[in-house]
């Protein structure tokens, strides 16, 4: 199996005996460098559990996850936190910004944690602020800006270190439709101009239509996959809706 990220037969079970929940049940797939992959499925289908295992937040019950040649399921806790810091970026529904720091300081903090000199850090932060249209609000605190702006700051913070993989769990969940659209266009731009590899969990067909490929989960298993190819986004959206209508999936924001 080739691929930049290789997920091999992973399982995550909760509980035991008759009370066992197979949250993720023998899932395998690969992600190539520069792909923008969506994970869809009804509530309880295992999306977040899958994302958390890729994020090294949760351990697999069985199976292996390779990033290049590194099997992250075999790493010690110390090595894992190092791996996380050097390779992964996260965007969550609730932003996770530090309220006592300005928008700019939130981004600078992510760079400082990695080390480097002050001048370079300031330059990288400035580039990110410009790229994500945050220059005008750089000195504001998170409570002074909109949800969409907070989420774009969270993206800037996640992407400023050029992670191998950006993991996003319902990043548009708390946004109005205009802010959601701006964020998704930002993801597309990051994906195309920075070759950022993105894995995004969403229950929302509109958000998923920005992806290049979608994995559909049901009862912890991948039951379908859609590839956008050269299709227009509207066309891809219709295909997604068709799959969801067959499976009783949730629709919103369309
Ligand atoms: N810590 C846990 N302990 C026990 N069961 C869990 C735990 N976390 C998740 N589960 C179960 O695993 C299954 C998958 O949950 P998961 O949160 O991954 O689904 P999801 O597709 O992300 O759902 P949603 O869209 O509602 O967030 C569900 O049946 C859930 O109840």
Image (cartoon, rainbow, N blue to C red):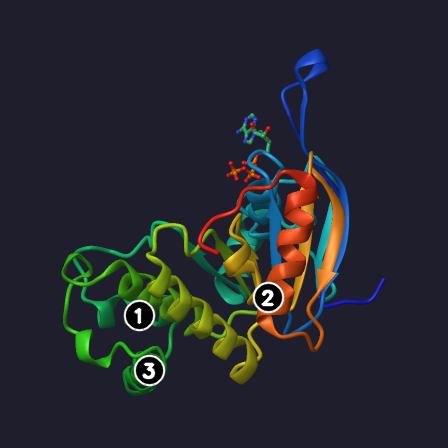
Q: Earlier in the sequence, mark 3 or mark 2?
A: 3
Q: Depth-wise, is mark 3 or mark 2 nearer the camera? A: 2
Residue bearing mark 1 = 107
Marks 2/1: CA distance? 25 Å
Which residue is painted at 49% across and 79% down in the image? 189
Tell me the SS state at disc 1: helix
Residue 197 visible somewhere in the drawing: no
Residue located 64% across and 65% down the image = 236
- Quadrant in the rendering for residue 119: bottom left
Q: Which residue is denoted by mark 2 in the rendering?
A: 211
Quarter of the displayed picture in which ligand 1 can be seen = top right
Local secondary structure at mark 2: loop
Pick the residue in front: 220 or 71: 220
Please say if 223 is above or below 208.
above
Distance, label 3 to label 2, CA atoms, is 36 Å
Label 1 crowd (10 A; few <14 / some 14-19 / many >=20)? many
- Farthest right residue in view: 1
Q: Earlier in the sequence, mark 2 or mark 1?
A: 1
Q: Residue at x 16, y 56 (%)?
A: 143
Q: Between residues 51 and 209, which one lies in front from this camera angle?
A: 209
- Characterize the local packing of mark 3: few (<14), some (14-19) or many (20 or more) Cα atoms within 10 angstroms: few
Callout in the foreground (3, 1): 1
Quickly name the residue at label 3.
117
Quadrant in the picture for the N terminus: bottom right
């Amino acid at each position: 199996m080739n691929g930049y990220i290789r997920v091999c037969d992973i399982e995550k079970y909760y509980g035991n005996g008759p009370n066992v929940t197979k949250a993720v049940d023998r899932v395998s797939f690969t992600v190539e460098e520069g792909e923008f992959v969506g994970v869809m499925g009804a509530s309880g289908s295992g999306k977040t559990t899958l994302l958390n295992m890729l994020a090294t937040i949760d351990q697999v019950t069985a199976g292996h996850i390779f990033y290049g040649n590194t099997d992250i399921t075999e790493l010690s806790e110390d090595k894992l936190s190092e791996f996380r810091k050097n390779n992964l970026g996260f965007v969550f529904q609730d932003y996770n910004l530090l309220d006592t720091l300005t928008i700019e300081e939130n981004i600078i903090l992510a760079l400082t944690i990695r080390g480097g000199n002050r001048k370079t850090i300031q330059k990288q932060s400035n580039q990110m602020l410009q790229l994500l249209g945050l220059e005008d609000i750089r000195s504001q605190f998170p409570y002074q800006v909109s949800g969409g702006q907070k989420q774009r700051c969270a993206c800037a913070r996640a992407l400023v270190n050029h992670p191998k993989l950006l993991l996003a769990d319902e990043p548009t969940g708390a946004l109005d439709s205009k802010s959601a659209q701006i964020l998704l266009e930002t993801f597309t731009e990051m994906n195309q101009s920075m070759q950022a590899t993105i894995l995004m969990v969403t229950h929302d067909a509109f958000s998923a239509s920005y992806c290049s490929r979608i994995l559909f989960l049901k009862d912890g298993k991948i039951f379908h996959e859609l590839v956008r190819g050269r299709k227009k986004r509207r066309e891809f959206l219709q295909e997604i809706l068709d799959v969801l209508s067959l499976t009783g999936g949730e629709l919103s924001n369309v």
